[in-house]
Image (spheres, helix red, strand yellow):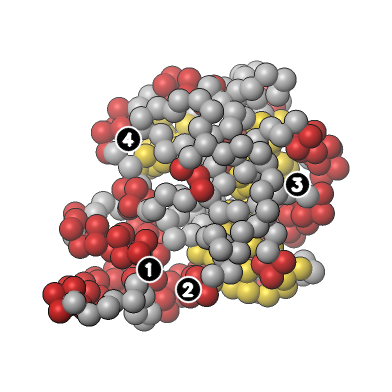
Amino acid sequence: MPPELFHSDEGYRSAFSAGLGRLLGDDRLGSFVLVLANASYDPQIRETLDPAIRERFQVLAARLRDDLVRGRPHGQPADDLLVFLKLMAVGLDALEPVRQRRAGPWELQYNPLRSFRPARMSSGRVTGLHRPFDPAGFHFNRPFLEQETLWRGRLQGRECALFYNKFPFAPLHGLLVVEPARELPQFLDHGHHDYLWEVTRALGAGMPGVGFGYNARGAFASVNQLHFQMFVRDAGRYPVESEQWRHNGGEADYPVPCRLFREPAAAWEAIGELHRREQPYNLLYRPGRLYLVPRAGQGSRPQAAWSGGFAWSEVAGAFTVSNVSDFHRLRAGEISRELARLAVAGA
């Protein structure tokens, strides 16, 4: 049986929110940014934490301003400092919360705070599905990330760490790092595929909205350490899961070829073939199901100005923009055409 944290949607949400509240007591700017971003995404969390967020922002901003005026070392990581300075320039009142709407079959999300995040591995062209883990690069074992941990322990027989996503774009968004001490690169092997299938099935018994996204290297993976992006949706399925699409038994073709698997062995056979071809791909694990989308590698084709790149969420039909004009003007046809540009021969 999974740990108690994962027994129900309600229990997971409660622990998720409580952990964010505790993080507000941390003096590090990165902790504040994480809490604000998660609260901006989730109205329930924002309602609970908003007074404490505003009070903490004033304290941290005054302290940082004084440090800068007096030339004192602030001791904050450069990435977190840059994001917080942007927040000081904009102000909390001017920072809009996440907004969402439908555009035909697609989900659109206006997420202004996410645009503040620094670029990592996902910002440039990447070749090859496998690259050795780099202890000197950005990874989840860095000591300063420890405060961003929601949970650590054994999950279905393996040691795992579940981190908050500092800039979430999915409900109750976490990053599940499997066997972090092994320092595994972001490359899916047969054993970890079977493991994630079983984890999703087990958690789905009490949390039917649970799922995991996976970005292969070259498919907008942002960190080269084995991880899966956890979410818990309580408001329906991703667009790729709609019954209208041919891969789900419907009559409409998905803009980019997608395959649905209901058995882990058949899914692995297809994934293994993509590995042999060095073909980037995105995955969406749901209890008893896996959606597989082979796609053009990041940076190999031009992308629309409104897009920050298509990773697992976009491939699943949920698109994030940071420009409010794009949020209002985008229509289903333009989104479908952009998604179709990911198609590759032989998929």
Q: Which residue is mark 3?
A: 288
Element at badge 4?
Answer: helix
Q: Please determine whether, in this image, residue 112 is positioned above or below residue 61.
A: above
Question: What amino acid type is highlighted by mark number 4?
Answer: Phe
Element at badge 1?
Answer: loop
Contact? badges 1 and 2 (CB < 8 Å): yes
Q: Mark 1 against mark 3, which lies toward the viewer?
A: 1
Residue 19 as seen in the image, left or right of residue 27: right
Q: Which residue is mark 2?
A: 144
Q: Earlier in the sequence, mark 2 or mark 4?
A: 2
Q: Residue 55: x, y in percent? A: 23, 76
* Rendering quarter of residue 130: top right
Residue 300 as seen in the image, left or right of residue 197: left
Q: CA distance from mark 1 to mark 4?
A: 32 Å
Q: Earlier in the sequence, mark 1 or mark 3?
A: 1
Q: CA distance from mark 2 to mark 3?
A: 36 Å
Q: Earlier in the sequence, mark 3 or mark 4?
A: 3
The outermost residue toward the left is 69
Q: CA distance from mark 2 to mark 4?
A: 34 Å
* Rendering quarter of residue 283: top right
Residue 327's label in the rendered image is 4
Q: Earlier in the sequence, mark 1 or mark 4?
A: 1
Q: Which residue is mark 1?
A: 77
Question: What amino acid type is highlighted by mark number 3?
Answer: Gly
User: Residue shown at 70%/59% (left/top)?
Assistant: 184
Q: CA distance from mark 1 to mark 3?
A: 41 Å
Q: Residues within 10 Å of mark 3 (few under 14, many from 20)?
A: some
Question: What amino acid type is highlighted by mark number 1?
Answer: Pro
Residue 200's label in the rendered image is none
Contact? badges 2 and 3 (CB < 8 Å): no
Residue 346 as seen in the image, left or right of residue 26: right
